[in-house]
Image (cartoon, rainbow, N blue to C red):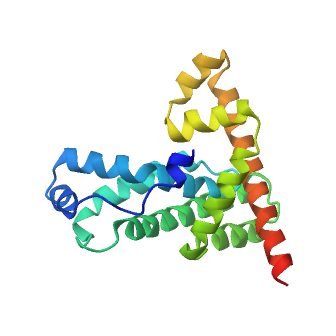
Amino acid sequence: MNRALNQPTDDLPEESYRLAKAGDMRAIEAIVRHHQAALRAWLAAHCPLGGDADDVAQRTFVAAITRLADFEVGTDFRAWLFSIARYQLMSEATRLRRLADYHSRLAPEILARELERRAQEPEDRTTERLMHLRECVAAMSESARQFIQWRYDDQLPLEDMAARTGRSVGAIKKQLWLLRQKLQQCMEDKLAAEEGGAA
């Protein structure tokens, strides 16, 4: 996990982006590999309750690849990518709001406001959140860290994780969901403690 959190903002040569814009699939794959760990870590910290961070990451990359012609070589690709991720998070928030309203009608407007607030959080808090995420992961049990590493560092498919543990894919999904919630709560507690100390 530390590998993803400590990844530099961008050290790919500009030529990679020029080639990608020209449709070079190897360059596109290199860009995705280079940025996916940081993006997945950020999404794991920001994805709303009930959301699927992996799905949002995939949609973000699909949208970015589709819109590569709009990217200006020489500018900050990661900032551009994260702006697309924020839009995808807002779309996910909208989807979850509609789902919540359809299924339960349980405070859909409050839920929507909270999800949209998270999606629009300024990027300058990303470094702080990632630092807390690293601390929270380190405090987890070894088995929990193994699940996190398999999914977000090694990008192991759910089916492979299920095979390694002798559990169903559904059980693995639930386990990952619970771990994400635990990490999110841990980070929120740390942020709240910082804000309380600053006051």
Work out whether residue 128 or residue 89 is closer to the camera in this orientation and state it. 128
x and y percentages locating residue 157 in the rendered image: 50, 30
- The answer to whether 40 is drawn above or below residue 148 in the figure is below
Q: Residue at x 56, y 53 (%)?
A: 41
Horizontal side, residue 159 vs residue 115: left or right? left
Horizontal side, residue 137 vs residue 34: left or right? right
x and y percentages locating residue 29 in the rendered image: 28, 45
Question: Which quarter of the rendered picture does the C terminus lie within?
Answer: bottom right
Work out whether residue 135 or residue 28 is closer to the camera in this orientation and state it. 135
Q: Is residue 50 visible?
A: yes
Horizontal side, residue 169 vs residue 88: left or right? right
x and y percentages locating residue 83 in the rendered image: 45, 70
Horizontal side, residue 157 vs residue 62: left or right? right
Q: Residue at x 54, y 24 (%)?
A: 159
Quarter residue 104 falls in: bottom right
x and y percentages locating residue 74 in the rendered image: 24, 73
Q: Residue at x 42, y 63 (%)?
A: 9
Work out whether residue 94 or residue 66 is closer to the camera in this orientation and state it. 66
Work out whether residue 1 or residue 183 is closer to the camera in this orientation and state it. 1
